[in-house]
């Protein structure tokens, strides 16, 4: 810093038109920062952390990414970015499973290594019920079927909301189709209530199987199977992102035909015109100073997320496309404000 002092003062006078006194006063304002900003120990510490994390990512990629996902589990956007990085690295991220998941993200210890979602990452599913499931599994083995699961889990937090969450996110896929299980939710809860309140060896109202040493039969009524669209919506709702697929996969050819995706918008300049496409994730209504309705839309594609501004005139013309969970293409202009990139819509159409 001392070496730069003279150069700074002379430069301020030469290029900034300052007096020597003002240049010296300015120097004194930020001179104390050297105690932090140019601290060698501070730089060495961060350098060491960067070295260690780079080593872990290169040599133990699945373990490292699992730890990162767990550390960021409260931030859905960051989780999405990290899962995208996992895919780039060739690491598959699996949905939650009552027979395979632990509380947090964990590595599936068979090659090629994969990462499994944790039970506490499911919305409406707390640490208590998650711990009860993993403890029961550790003590008495994996659950053989749905009846076995409902019989063995005594925790009071296994209720309608938590059971629905397990079904919708796919954690019970090994035991039944999601739509059919949801159609039987009251039946499942009644069975569970009877099993946890019944004395041991007491017959069930649901009827015994031929082998009296086994659990009562859990008979499920028929019902409509869940569509792929419904499954993806449930995953988004409960996990914060799509796991078993993506709504835009059906439009892959159209997306590839576009020159720009959302990730590339940050490299464009203010006012550049282009076309982007994606799925509408969120809509926020606001009123302009003229008391007219406009919309800020959260649009996502396979590369990222962008905020799209739709002003009143454009909104009135293309209102039918401004709906959650629909896939659209938007022609518009890039906007740059406070180092953040957004998009201003001019035309909208369905994909």
Image: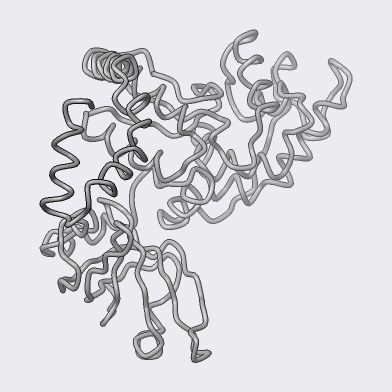
Quadrant assignment for the C terminus: bottom left
Task: Give above or below for 148 relative to 285.
Answer: above
Q: Quadrant of residue 17?
A: bottom left
Specify whether 344 is left or right of 132: left
Q: Position of residue 181 (x, y in %)?
A: 60, 44
Is the N terminus in the top left, top right, bottom left or bottom right quadrant?
A: top left
At 35% from the left and 69% from the top, the residue drawn is 308
Q: How is the image coloured?
A: one colour
Residue depicted at 33% across the width and 56% down the height: 305
**x and y, in percent, of residue 103 in the image:** 56, 24
**Residue, x 30% and y 30% (percent of image)?**
92
Please tell me whether residue 240 is drawn above or below residue 149 in the rendered image.
Answer: below
Q: Nearer the viewer, residue 69 or 98?
A: 69
* Left-right relation of 3 to 244: left
Of the pair 159 and 304, the residue shown nearer to us: 304
- Residue 80 visible in the shown view: yes
Q: Position of residue 264 (x, y in %)?
A: 18, 55
Q: Which residue, as the protein is rendered here, is positioned at the far top?
A: 139
């Amino acid at each position: 810093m001392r070496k730069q002092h003279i150069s700074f003062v002379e430069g301020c006078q030469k290029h900034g038109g300052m007096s020597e006194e003002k240049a010296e006063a300015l120097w004194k304002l930020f001179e104390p920062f050297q105690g932090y900003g140019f601290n060698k120990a501070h730089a060495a510490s961060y350098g060491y952390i960067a070295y260690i994390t780079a080593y872990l990512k290169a040599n133990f990629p699945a373990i490292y990414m699992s730890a990162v996902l767990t550390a960021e589990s409260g931030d859905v956007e960051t989780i999405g970015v990290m899962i995208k990085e996992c895919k780039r690295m060739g690491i598959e991220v699996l949905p939650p499973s009552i027979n395979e998941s632990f509380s947090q993200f964990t590595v599936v210890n068979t090659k090629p290594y994969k990462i499994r979602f944790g039970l506490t990452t499911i919305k409406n599913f707390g640490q208590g019920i998650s711990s009860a499931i993993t403890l029961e599994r550790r003590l008495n083995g994996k659950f053989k079927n749905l009846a076995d699961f409902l019989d063995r889990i005594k925790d009071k937090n296994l209720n309608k909301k938590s059971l629905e969450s397990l079904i919708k996110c796919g954690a019970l896929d090994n035991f039944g189709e999601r739509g059919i299980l949801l159609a039987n939710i009251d039946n499942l809860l009644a069975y569970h209530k009877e099993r946890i309140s019944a004395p041991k060896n007491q017959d069930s109202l649901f009827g015994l199987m031929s082998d009296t040493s086994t659990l009562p039969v859990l008979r499920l009524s028929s019902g409509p199977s869940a569509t792929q669209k419904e499954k993806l919506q449930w995953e988004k709702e409960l996990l914060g992102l799509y796991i078993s697929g993506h709504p835009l996969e059906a439009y892959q050819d159209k997306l590839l035909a576009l020159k720009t995706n959302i990730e590339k918008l940050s490299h464009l300049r203010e006012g550049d015109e282009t076309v982007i496409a994606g799925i509408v994730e969120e809509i926020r209504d606001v009123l302009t100073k003229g008391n007219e309705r406009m919309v800020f839309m959260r649009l996502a594609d396979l590369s990222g997320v962008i905020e799209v501004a739709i002003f009143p005139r454009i909104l009135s013309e293309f209102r039918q496309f401004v709906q959650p969970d629909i896939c659209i293409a938007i022609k518009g202009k890039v906007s740059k404000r406070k180092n953040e990139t957004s998009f201003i819509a001019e035309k909208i159409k369905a994909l």
